[in-house]
Each structure stands twice: as structure tokens, then as C-alpha cells.
Amino acid sequence: MQELAGSVLRPQDSPVPAEQRILYVLEQLDSLAKSLVDAKTINAASKHAKHPDTATSALLGSVNNRQAPSSVTKATLLTLISQKAEEIVRHDYVFITPGVLKAYTELQTLLHQPSSFPDVFSLYANKPVPVAASNTVSFSPATPDKINTAIDPKTANAALSAAITAHDLPLATDIIETSFCTPSFRKAKVLRQALVPIGGLALAPPAAYSLASVFGAWQPMLDPSQATWMAFAGIMTYISAVSMTGYVAITTANDQMDRVTWAQGVPLWERWVREDERAAVDRVAGAWGFKSLEKRGEEEGVDWEDLREWVGRRGMVLDKVELMDGME
């Protein structure tokens, strides 16, 4: 196992390992972890240890056939896999790509070892980029606020699910802060979801003027120039009214909210941009609070009070009274 993990940093064409090599090693570690978790697979692998077809089966064979000390247990091996995976992503020469981060998150989730997620997420955005030149490695500074440093929502949600499963509230809030709360995540959301509508609105005036010109030339009752501007004003008024109605409808939608809602005074645009953050906080609140609707609002304890205070600092409200059942 140590040899497999160390092979990532074994110089071949470049001292900086390629993404494919890192993903291959993480995939093999993942396969080994799954096999250790599944006792049936371990038994099957031990039968074929004499003729291993893959690096994973060879590792499994060596693990099962080796006369290991009694202190070496399955839990010890799984912990070692987790440590080796973390050593790989933390190494200075390893550049963490979205694919590597996803593979690492899936592996640590399988191992029930989510404690490193906040640090690795922060490392993903802030780690200096290694650049190989003439068998030497230099480092260029990272730009945390760039769009390409945003955590993929699926990866962030998978990490949050692992923290919720571990029932670790500080870990869950740290994962939210290092993924959904970052400026790069919000910029990426705007680029993914708002760029096309904004571009359409930017093209609306010239398109509207072209249609208005056709109308002005076609009608015989008014001066063409006057008719053109009247038609242009009408078209733009219609587009503005429909766009504003759609904007308000999207930014004020609350059907998806369960226990966490926005506090008064939070701008509509900010509500839309930070909706993924609010949804993540809502998941945490739902996991830590009572599932029964009748008991909601009766939660007590240090964790719950810390969560309520943390939610309030983020411009949200936990269990807004006027939105609770029977309090309308």
C-alpha cells in the first residue's frame, strides 16, 4: 500500500505527477478500501491472490497472505488508506484538480473519515501551483477568488453528507464555510446560471430596436421615426416588466425552505447567489433537530444553540416563528 501511494511522486516524465496518475492511485486505494469493507470480496481476492489481474488484487492478496502482527486489523488498514490518500493531496508537488478532489472526497466518505475535508477544500483554493521546468519545480501563487477554485456543488454536498453521518456539527459548518460560502463559489454560480439570462437582456435593446424599425416602416399612419421609437418603448417596457416579475419570483421563492430562512434585509440578489449555502445550512438543521413537526422549536443543548447563533451571523433565521406550522 505504501509503495502504491508513493508511486504518485515517482518521477517519470516530470517531477509533478499528472492528474491521470493521481486518479489511478486514488482509484486503487478506493478499490482496496471497498474490498476491505466487504468481507466477501476479501475472501474472493485471497483465492485469486496467486494470479492477480490488477494492482488492487495484488495488494489484496498481499494483505491477506502476509503474516501480519495481530495488532494489524481491518480498521488499521482502512485508517492507513485514509492517511496515505491525505498525504497525496497535501504533497507540495500534487496539484489538486476537480477530479482529484472528487475522488479524494469519495474515498474518505467511504472510509468514514471526513475530518480532513475543510482543510483540503481550503488547500484546493489556496495551494500554490507546482510548475515543472528542467527537472526543477517552482510554485506560482494561487488565486482563491478565481472561478476555477470553486468547489463543485456535488463534491461539497457529498462531503457535507459525510459530516452529517458522522454527526459532527463543527465539521459540517466548516465544510459549508470552505465550499458554499467562498466568493469563488458564488462567482461560479453566476457564471453557470445567470450568464445566459444576463446576456439575453443585454441583447434585448438592439433586437427590440430592429423589430421596432420594421414596425415603423410597415405602418402608414405615423412618421416612421416616431412609430419606431414608440414601438421600441413598448417592447422594452414589456421585456422589463416580464424580467422583473421573473426575477422577483425566482429570488423570493421559499417552497424549498424547511427550517432555515432568510432574515429581513438580505437583498434579493444575495439570496439567490447564496441559496446553495442556505440549503446546506437547512440540511444541517434538519439533521440535528427533531424530525417530528410537532416537536420543532423545542430543541435544546449546546450544539443547537451554537447552530442557531451561527445561522444568525450568516443573515439567516432558524425556525422563523411566523413560518412555523400553526403560527401563520
Image (cartoon, rainbow, N blue to C red):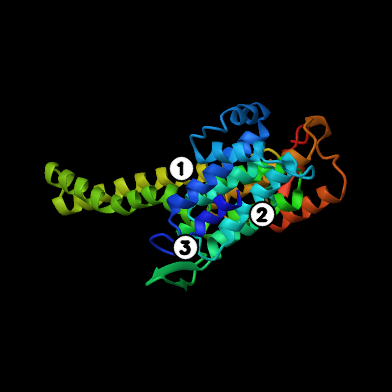
Residue at image point 61% right, 58% down: 87
Q: Which residue is mark 3?
A: 146
Q: How many numbered marks does the figure carry? A: 3
Front-lying residue, 83 or 323:
83
Question: Residue at 52% of width from left, 43% of height from top?
Answer: 27
- x then y, percent, for residue 70: 79, 42
Q: Separation of disc 3 and disc 2 at Cα?
A: 23 Å
**Can you give x and y, in whole percent of width and height, for residue 320 in the image?**
74, 44
The residue tagged 1 is 246
- Upstream in sequence: badge 1 or badge 3: 3
Identify the amino acid type marked 3. Answer: Lys
Identify the residue position indicated by label 2 in the image.
Answer: 116
How far apart, in angstroms, are the residues tagged by discs 1 and 2? 41 Å
| Quadrant where the image shows the C terminus | top right
Residue 21, compared with residue 133, is above or below; it is: above
Q: Image quadrant of residue 118?
A: bottom right
Task: Kindly state the secondary structure of the residue where label 1 is placed.
Answer: helix
Discs 1/2, front: 2
Looking at the image, can residue 153 be seen? no
Crowding around mark 2 (Cα neighbors within 10 Å: few <14, some 14 to 19, many 20+) is some
Q: On the rendered structure, is 114 left or right of 134?
A: right
Say which label, 3 or 2, has the lower sequence index: 2
Residue pictured at 76% horizontal, 47% vertical: 168
Question: Is residue 133 visible to the viewer in this orientation of the structure?
Answer: yes
- Dot 1 or dot 2: first in sequence order is 2
Closer to the eye: label 3 or 2: 2
Q: Is residue 185 left or right of residue 76?
A: left
